[in-house]
Image (spheres, rainbow, N blue to C red):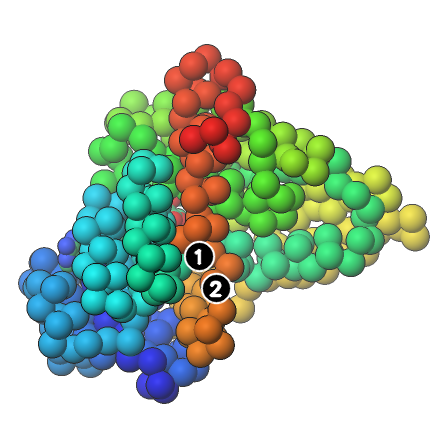
Amino acid sequence: MGEFRGAVIGCGFFAVNQMHAWRDAAGGGIVAICDLDPARLAAVGNEFGIAARYDDAAEMLDEVKPDFVDIATTVKSHRPLVELALARGIPVICQKPFASDMADARAMVEAAEKAGVPLMVHENFRWQTPIQAVRAVLDTGEIGTPFFGRVSFRSAYDVYAGQPYLAEGERFIIEDLGIHALDTARFLFGEATAITARTQRVNPRIRGEDVATMMLGHASGMTSVVDCSYATRAEAELFPQTLVDIDGADGSLRLGADYRLTVTGAAGSRHADVSPVLLPWASRPWHNIQESVLTIQQHWIDCLRENREPATSGRDNLSTLALVEAAYRSAGDGGATVDPRSL
Ligand code: NAD
Ligand code: 89Y
């Protein structure tokens, strides 16, 4: 268990991964869980041997007094639950999307800063082993100054089976999945100062957009394309792989299918397998995401112990959310260029 006692709010589809990862994290673990749905509460409680079970988050926080709370509910409940924890001075992790508008996101960040309480968004894609490998190559300077980048996620995987709410919202792919790709673009290429976007709905059985194509201008001067689709039936189904292309002044980098990394420089090309580890509790094809859940949760514990701001703090996530909001504005305005910093 270790020194930090955590409590989880929301025992649904994705929380099971978080519960597994908390068992593996060094220095922290889960002592209490909460869900409004008794069946989900019982299933997770039984699977992970947690006796302290609540259907009321405030009651759980007041009785258990955890060292941190991990909110794994969908977006509508994020602000009230984050504020519940902050009001009690309890450090809080909140799942993505952090908020459905900038006002809610800013209010949570300001409340956390005012209270002096750590707040991290569970933005885990940048923590994936292959994405970290790409970043490590960029940091060596081997390909020179990047001038073009692409972050691409294209699939026809049936995400609606496990997460039926994804088919029901007015917004879908940018808010759910594009948010990770946009965060990855920020992580690899730096902040963006402009975005233009187009969205499409290909699947007639869902309400929101399932295809988005976005072009970003970055403060560094480089250009990137972030594209995502849940309507792409390809010979090889790559879910949930993010592919990355980067062209630099001295070379290029390709993160291709099946986690193959190719780096080309003056001396030619080299190849590496940057596959994620298949953790004992993980299952393909989700193992890439599942490994990153453990990595981000371990990062949270390390930051708590060392009194550091997490890489994906609430404040950091405001820039990712601004890109999401700017992309929807641009798409709604015929692809107009929007400066995310103005939102
Ligand atoms: P879900 O609907 O399966 O589970 C949410 C659970 O929260 C439900 O069991 C619900 O009863 C419970 N809940 C809601 N409000 C509550 C409250 N006030 N108190 C206690 N319990 C409450 O949803 P999910 O698919 O597990 O997704 C949860 C979040 O995780 C979403 O925001 C989703 O975008 C995110 N997610 C993230 C990743 C990732 O890789 N980071 C992957 C999948 C889902
Ligand atoms: O909800 C999404 C996420 O965050 O990662 C993949 C996903 O589960 C479906 O798009």
Residue 172 position in % (x across, y down)? 34, 34
Q: Residue at x 57, y 44 (%)?
A: 186
Q: Observer-nearest residue: 263 or 101?
A: 101
The residue indicated by pointer 1 is 313
Query: Would you call the spot at circle 2 few (<14 residues within 10 Å), some (14-19), or many (20 or more)?
Result: some
Residue 190 position in % (x across, y down)? 62, 44
Query: Does 49 sit above or below residue 108?
Result: below
Residue 336 position in % (x across, y down)? 50, 16
Query: Would you call the spot at circle 1 few (<14 residues within 10 Å), some (14-19), or many (20 or more)?
Result: some
Does the closest atom of ligand 1 sit within 8 Å of the Cβ of label 2? no
Q: Amino acid at mark 1?
A: Ser
The residue indicated by pointer 2 is 309
Discs 1, 2 touching: Cβ within 8 Å? yes
Query: Does 191 sit above or below residue 299?
Result: above
Q: Quadrant of residue 326?
A: top left
Residue furthest toward the right? 267
Q: Residue at x 25, y 50 (%)?
A: 78
Q: Amino acid at mark 2?
A: Glu
